Image (spheres, rainbow, N blue to C red):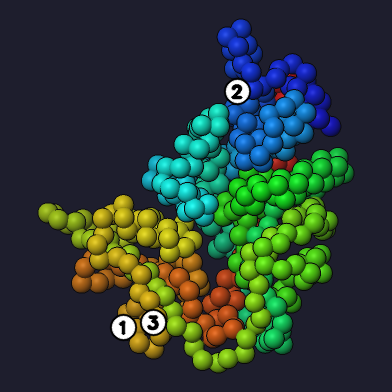
Amino acid sequence: MVLARFVALVIAGLMLSAVTPTQAEEVDRIAAVVNDDIISIRDLDARVKLALVVSNLPDSLENRRRLLPQVMRKMIDEHLQMQEANRVKIQISSEELNRAIASIERQNRMKPGGLLAQLSNAGVDTDAVREQIRADIAWMRVVGRLLQPTVRVGEEEITERLDTIRQQIGRPEYMLAEIVLPVETPTQEEEARRLGERLLDQIKAGAPFQALARQFSQSSSASNGGMLGWIGESSLDDDWRDPVGRLDKGQISGLIRGSGGYSIVLVVDRRITGGSTEPDMMTLFRLVFPTPTGKPAPRDQLVAKATSMTATAKDCDTLEDLSNELNSTKSGRIENVRPAGLPPDVAKAIGGLPLGRASAPIESPDGLAVFMICSGGGTAGMPSRSQVRRQIEDERVELLARRHIRDLRRAAFVDFRL
């Protein structure tokens, strides 16, 4: 109710897109205070403009009024996330931020530098874009440091999940992406539903699903464009099973009301679970950190640096970007490898490693090397035990992350100043 009154005052007092010199003092006013952080009218304007451009919506007073509550709520969450990151001494470097932007550009098939240039040409303040991405990365790091270590998955749980998957052989599994709009109080019900309906309209009109997920979804998958990976039919949430089961590749669901709110699901791809027991061929990426010339740094420092630089990498494209930054000519993909044919030290490094997670650094003739499995590594048509472990871990971490941000909201002092 407080946020609703705040939105009405903002819209009544200021059409944010058209700031004249006499309004300069107005847009620098404080819109809200989140604990000790300030959100100004100018900050809010920049983010509303970004939301309009990403959603492919006309910049009108009515569209701003509709988007402003969700944008404000997301900005508040981002400030809480950054405050939590600062509390546990997590800092996001410029290099990490640039790598994340490059990853977004690859996902959207844009040329390097194209994302910020395109948004700037559309009138978006690129500092607002960078700060949003920085908050996404920081929250991923917070979740990884505080919540991930608390999750334990037993071998019996993995076996039970694999048994369930085996029973689904011959049935569909789906590569999914999501947009999540939680409803935590009755007053958010109508707001979330209307936003979901508008997002559906924009997706049908051609707006990129991943861009909308990154801007509006309130799930930890938002930082990755909503991508969830492959999920078997039996592992789908009960609320999703029927809607997703009716979709073909490339189709989106309607607005799905679940126990925690609304969601929109995109079927990126679908396939039939197979039953072959032949091991898959693997594709690996090998990232080599060259040994510095001159006086070498202590090995533990080199290991710490390699570990830090690869900790947030979620795919082999990210490692490839890192190799280009390092000018590491010895790095690259290794195609069509069988696990049994790997050198013992490499096999040990990737043993039990799920897809999309970097290994610990190991010694190599060219320097420290980090490996990642890009594809394969399990039984054809079946995930490996490590992949199942990762899936269960991710499910639990996602639940913990939602609870953690909810607790931060409840404990926060948020003061709307207009």
Q: Which mark is residue 343?
A: 1
- Between disc 1 and disc 2, whose residue precedes? 2
Q: Quick check: 221 left or right of 190?
A: left
Q: Quadrant of the N terminus?
A: top right
Mark 1 vs mark 2, CA separation in Å = 56 Å
The answer to which of marks 3 and 2 sits earlier in the sequence is: 2
Residue type at the position of mark 1: Pro
Residue in the foreground of this view, choosing between 18 and 91: 18
Alpha carbons under labels 1 and 3: distance apart: 11 Å
Q: Which residue is drawn at 19% across and 56% down?
A: 292
* Element assignment for label 2: helix
Label 2 amino acid?
A: Arg
User: Which numbered mark, 3 or 2, is in the foreground of this view?
Assistant: 3
On the picture, is 46 further left or further right than 346?
A: right
Name the amino acid, label 3: Val
Q: Is residue 59 visible?
A: yes
Q: How crowded is mark 2: few (under 14 residues within 10 Å), some or many (20 or more)?
A: many
Q: Do callouts 3 and 2 mark residues in contact (Cβ within 8 Å)?
A: no
Query: Dot 3 corresponds to which residue?
Result: 337
Mark 1 nearby-residue class (10 Å; few <14, some 14–19, many ≥20): few
Please say if the residues under marks 1 and 2 sit with CB atoms less than 8 Å apart.
Answer: no
